[in-house]
Image (cartoon, rainbow, N blue to C red):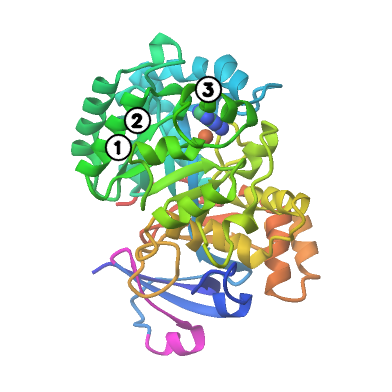
């Protein structure tokens, strides 16, 4: 049995702070001892108590000026778009044509895909992100490249081949039949292998025919436990285009619902231009939304209405997405800083407890993995991030004036970024350590 222990201030969520008082939802240990056995959390208790029974031969790492959290979860990100972050000027549909569909063609080359997948996993780990729902490209080799690198780090990636059979360059399109067959082969190869999970990935309604969406729905029903991800109600022009392309459907979301693409393990990115019927459909079907604040601001898409999504009488599961490359940072701390500003423009102050919940347990609930990840509790997989409260002179100075945990968390949301990530543990192994000579190591 492989054992280790880590000690320091720690926090986790026992409930949803959109539905419960902050003090009920969040649990904080000023000085915790977390014991890890074979990649899982064996126990978490006050250090004073835990140290008494800790055998002398179990390696112990102490993080005094830190905060230990569950690893961050990115519920929506495109790895092939790393090379085009910060593409100037356009709104969604023009941005796709001018930049995205150009970059994604490079992934026909498996060597390029492997190079970018390697860089991508390292950026996630540097940001403290341990699980992500990832769009690859139309090319099956782009999926192999991502899962192969994820398998080396033992991270959990939920990923899949993009399906597009219209309104995209010929180099990036498949057909309803080939998209189905290629996705099926990838499911058989990767779904449930180690920590890897497959996600059926029609890009968005405008780039799939009804036949392709229906084939995707059939594939999903035939493979229980797999995921579906796509884009929904991101941009006003896009919503209008969907109305023209699918005149028989009552709304954008109805296009997906009609094709059998709503339900538990369906993740819809953006969901900015939603009405009550749409939110109700997500609640009823158990579908999840990915809030992508840096992206929605960068492309000028609009303001996600978090409080409407989280209405107490019909709460919808919401995770937090970076949406790289329309999003501008891998850091979920940066996403939270922007999520706060988005909420503020909508007339609401996102609390720090709500923010950190979205990045951890909320994401796990959205991805239906909240029995495995997103919490620090016995039996959970030990995917953890150690935040350094003295990471920069400014953070250190500002936090010396923080009066309680809520202020500390809020300052991290406001000023924090990848510099605040000291160590990222994947299944109990410190695969990223900021200050180590070799920052990244594959677990043994
Ligand atoms: N809608 C369809 N494809 C995309 C994409 O790649 N990024 C974003 N942000 N929206 C999309
Ligand atoms: Fe996206």
Q: Position of residue 261 (x, y in %)?
A: 36, 41
Q: Residue 76: x percent and y percent?
A: 49, 42
Mark sitting on residue 236: none
Mark 2 beta carbon near ligand 1 (under 8 Å): no
- Residue 47 within the segment the image draws in magenta: yes
Magenta-colored span: 38-53
Check contact, mark 1 vs mark 2: CB within 8 A: yes
Q: Earlier in the sequence, mark 3 or mark 2?
A: 2
Q: Residues within 10 Å of mark 1 (few under 14, many from 20)?
A: many
Residue 29 visible in rendering: no
- Indicate whether 107 appears above or below 437: above
Circle 2 sits in a helix, a strand or a loop, which is it? Answer: helix
Residue 140 screen position, x and y as percent: 30, 25
Q: Nearer the viewer, residue 250 or 47?
A: 250
Real-space CA distance between mark 3 and mark 2, rounded to the nearest whole angstrom: 17 Å
Residue labelled with disc 2: 213
- Choose the circle earlier in sequence order: 3 or 1: 1
């Amino acid at each position: 049995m492989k054992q280790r222990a880590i000690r320091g201030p720690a926090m986790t969520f026992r409930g949803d702070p959109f539905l419960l008082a902050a003090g009920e939802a969040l649990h904080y240990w000023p000085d915790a001892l977390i014991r890890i056995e074979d990649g899982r959390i064996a126990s978490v208790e006050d250090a004073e108590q835990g140290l008494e029974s800790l055998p002398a031969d179990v390696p112990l790492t102490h993080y005094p000026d830190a905060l230990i959290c569950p690893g961050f979860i990115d519920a929506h990100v495109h790895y092939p778009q790393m090379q085009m972050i910060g593409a100037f000027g356009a709104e969604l549909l023009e941005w796709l044509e001018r930049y995205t569909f150009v970059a994604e063609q490079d992934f026909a080359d498996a060597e390029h895909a492997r190079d970018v997948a390697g860089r991508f996993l390292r950026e996630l780990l540097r940001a403290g992100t341990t699980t992500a729902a990832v769009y690859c490209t139309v090319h099956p080799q782009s999926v192999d490249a991502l899962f192969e690198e994820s398998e080396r780090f033992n991270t959990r990636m939920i990923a899949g081949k993009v399906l597009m059979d219209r309104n995209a360059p010929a180099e990036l399109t498949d057909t309803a039949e080939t998209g189905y067959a290629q996705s099926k082969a990838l499911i058989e190869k990767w779904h449930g292998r180690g920590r890897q999970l497959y996600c059926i990935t029609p890009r968005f309604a405008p780039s799939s025919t009804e036949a392709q969406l229906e084939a995707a729905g059939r594939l999903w029903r035939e493979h229980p436990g797999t995921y579906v991800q796509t884009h929904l109600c991101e941009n006003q022009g896009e919503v209008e285009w969907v109305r023209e392309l699918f005149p028989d459907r009552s709304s954008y979301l109805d296009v997906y619902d009609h094709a059998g693409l709503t339900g538990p393990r369906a993740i819809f990115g953006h969901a900015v231009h939603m009405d009550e019927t749409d939110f109700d459909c997500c609640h009823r079907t158990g579908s999840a939304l990915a809030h992508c604040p840096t992206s929605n601001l960068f492309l000028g898409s609009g303001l996600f209405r978090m409080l409407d999504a989280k209405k107490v009488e019909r709460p919808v599961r919401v995770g937090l997405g970076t949406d790289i490359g329309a999003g501008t940072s891998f850091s979920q701390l940066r996403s939270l800083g922007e999520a706060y500003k988005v909420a503020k423009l909508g007339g609401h102050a996102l609390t720090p407890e709500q923010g950190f919940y979205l990045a951890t347990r909320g994401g796990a609930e959205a991805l239906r993995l909240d029995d495995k990840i997103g919490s620090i509790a016995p039996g959970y997989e030990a995917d953890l991030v150690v935040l350094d409260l003295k990471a920069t002179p400014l953070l250190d100075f500002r936090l010396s004036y923080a009066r309680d945990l809520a202020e500390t968390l809020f300052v991290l949301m406001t000023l924090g970024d990848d510099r605040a990530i000291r160590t990222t543990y994947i299944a109990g192994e410190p695969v990223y350590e900021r200050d180590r000579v070799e920052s990244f190591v594959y677990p043994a």
